[in-house]
Image (cartoon, rainbow, N blue to C red):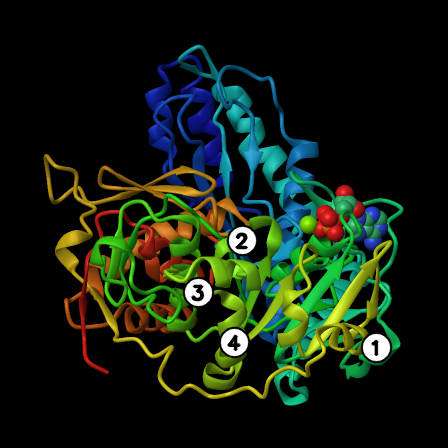
Amino acid sequence: MKTSTQLRHTLHALDGQSYKAYKRITGTYSCQSFPLQIAHVQADPFATPSRLRVQIPQSIAAYPPETHAHPSRNNALCTYLARQFSTAAHAGSRRNCGSGKSGLIDIDTPGQQVLERTCLFVDDEQVEARFTVGLPADGRRARGLDAAAMLCDDLPAIIAASLTYAANDPGDVRRYTESCEDADHLRAWLPAQELVAFVANGSILPRRSGIDDRPLENAMPFRSPPELEVTVTVPNRGPIAGMGIPAGVTLIVGGGFHGKSTLLNALERGIYNHIPGDGRELVVTDASAVKIRAEDGRSVAGVDISSFISDLPFGQDTIDFSTENASGSTSQAANIVEALELSSHLLLVDEDTAATNFMIRDARMRQLIQAEPITPFIDRVRPLFADCGTSTILVMGGTGDYFAVADTVIAMENYHPRQVTRQARALAAVDPPPAEVEPGIFETAPRIPDPDTFNPGTHTSRRRERIRVTGPKSLLVGRDPIDLSAIAQLIDASQTRALGAALLHLRRTLMDGRRSLAESVTHLMREIERYGLDALTDHPRGDLASFRPQELAAALNRHRPLRVIHGSH
Ligand code: ADP
Ligand code: MG
């Protein structure tokens, strides 16, 4: 291993040379006795910055085992350290020292959610950070002296100030790790209580804006209606009280602007843990929960939507329904069936983003129009729970039709929930119909992706297979775009990058024309669980974050050329 002094000499020597001369520093150096690897050097100052990684042995980093031994705590610690590194890097990097990305030191900085990321790892042996450096340039000439100062002076200082246990506040480390452990405990506790979600009293649900995920200042803290309040003891905070949402059909009603969607959005995100101070640390939802919405224009590949829609005009098949351009209702039906394919136990629906004709059909319309291909969701929401054990939480302020089928009705009033189940039932003048089981209506034949219809090769060369990430929620497979903008629970560009890598891996190793889509996805998730996200890529990357099987399937399902073969049950 070369020394840091050698790195400094090399950089001084290439000062003023062409930018390409930087390629010479690729390699591993000993930086204060731990290895600093310069894995990839950018080709020019405007290209994606250079990739580096550092491994600090625990003899120096010195994290006590209780901060990282348990997976919940480990994720939390890594999130905390990535944020700390980011803060230190932004404070200590020399921006404006040249053209392009000159002087930038950056890491894949986590937002409000705690995701497993490939930018930071902690285990018994070491702390590893993967980050990027914009090697400085004047025009297209290397500024070797600045680069030497960055890599040999600034960087060690940033590392020392952010990555060792001694550099950090043990109280902060504890808050992160204990908070995530409590949240995971809560999520795991839900099923035994026959709950699908829990919102702790005192939680802050609203966000600053649609593009700012931090908590709204001066927001009204959440307080459970007394009838739904449950108390649970979590490992670190001890007993906490909050609203438990029972399995079954739950309706959230209330006037416009009273906080209905805010509550549902918080539940959508309850599949993830949140950083301390977020306000949603103790808002948890069944891990398989899927936000369902209308998504007209999406493509659908051989989905059996016959439980919701049949007898389409001109005899279009709904048992094996394919389209390049789904309507509001057919897209929503496909979204539900695809969620069931991945065994989701909870659907989240908001009237703001649902297709009305899919949700309800009132008595007058039923009288006037008999030829209606849609069996509205209101007629399926109870069988869905009875047959598949899949609960639904539904925001519906505009119609009382669902009173008749809801087990629980929550009214939002000035951001405060009230339990109004009894009143709603009285108005509906019926108890929810006994959940009549209609065996088999939601059963569908496994869909097997046809590998020939998923082609990441460019048309010139099959060997240069790749999936490009073209935006925070868009991918390009070969020449075919995948639009993920309607996937509400895909929340981070690093997840999109990981999905791109996962789809390519899936195509290469699992899509064999025999495995079903659900099997392939499950198989891949097991691989990631065992070997980590690094298993998805041929070289270690620092910009991937974990995703769920639901989002991976969602991406595959939106690949426009995809065709499926139907297997037998
Ligand atoms: P609805 O879906 O009932 O029409 P929203 O959930 O969209 O209402 O909320 C309306 C507005 O109220 C949003 O701007 C939201 O940020 C704000 N809001 C929601 N909950 C709270 C709260 N607890 N405290 C303060 N403001 C809130
Ligand atoms: Mg709303």
- Residue 239 visible in the shown view: no
Disc 2 to disc 3: CB gap under 8 Å: no
Q: Nearer the viewer, residue 494 or 406?
A: 406
Q: CA distance from mark 4 to mark 2?
A: 23 Å
Q: CA distance from mark 2 to mark 3?
A: 15 Å
Question: Horizontally, is 285 left or right of 436 in the view?
Answer: right
- In the depicted structure, whether residue 558 falls above or below residue 360: above
Q: Say which label, 1 or 2, has the lower sequence index.
A: 1
List the residue tagged with mark 3. 336
Mark 3 or mark 4, which is nearer to you? 3
Q: CA distance from mark 1 to mark 4?
A: 25 Å
Q: Amino acid at mark 2?
A: Thr
**Residue drawn at (53%, 48%), measured in percent from left and top?**
492
Mark 2 or mark 3, which is nearer to you? 2
List the residue tagged with mark 4. 345
Helix, strand or loop at mark 2: helix
**Residue drawn at (16%, 60%), measured in percent from left and top?**
450
List the residue tagged with mark 2. 356
Q: Say which label, 1 or 4, has the lower sequence index.
A: 1
Q: Amino acid at mark 1?
A: Ile
**Residue drawn at (16%, 52%), measured in percent from left and top?**
453
Q: Residues within 10 Å of mark 4 (few under 14, many from 20)?
A: many
Helix, strand or loop at mark 1: strand
